[in-house]
Image (tube, grey):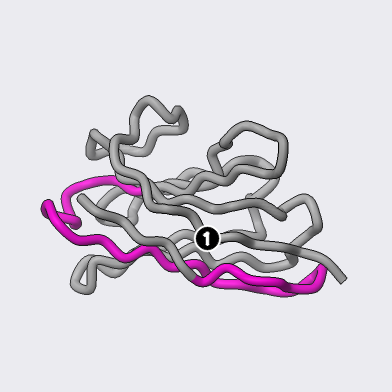
Amino acid sequence: VQLQAFGGGLVAPGGSLRLSCAASGRTFSRYGMGWFRQAPGKGREFVAATTWSGDTTDFTDSAKGRFTISRDNANKTMYLQMTSLKPEDTAVYYCAALKVPAVRVGRQWYDSWGQGTEVTVSS
């Protein structure tokens, strides 16, 4: 599956941003999907994931209560709604497709990656 993430930008602390991930290729609706991010000088870390149906989701602790993950299988698009953004959320955000129909945190469970979209939280 080919993935393309977009929607990043510059936002002030406390603001909101919605990232989108458009998919093409293999059957989108049968796979779990996730978001990762990589801050400058740091490794790529898990942010959120969802099953194909959206009935199971998982978030990194720092995102709980602030971020929402959702998907529109008919339009092969996944979203990450981010609210109450903090400077430490600044990173390049990547979407990825899971190899299995379940939520997983580790990068080894993902086999397709988008090109990333940059999010900068700054005043």
Magenta segment range? 7-33
Location of residue 53 with respect to 74 vertically, above or below? above
Location of residue 84 with respect to 32 vertically, above or below? below
* Residue 30 on the magenta span: yes
Question: Which of the 4 image quadrants contains residue 11?
Answer: bottom right
Residue 60: x and y in percent read: 60, 41
Quarter of the image for the C terminus: give it: bottom right
Of helix, strand and loop, which one carries label 1?
A: strand
Residue at mark 1: 117
Residue 106: x and y in percent read: 45, 28
Residue drawn where x is 61% and y is 72% of the image = 17
Q: Is residue 106 left or right of residue 73?
A: right
Residue drawn where x is 22% and y is 66% of the image = 73
Question: Which of the 4 image quadrants contains residue 10?
Answer: bottom right
Q: Is residue 84 left or right of residue 4?
A: right
Residue drawn where x is 51% and y is 44% of the image = 36
Residue drawn where x is 48% and y is 44% of the image = 58
The amino acid pointed to by label 1 is Thr
> Which of 46 and 11 lies nearest the eye of the viewer?
11
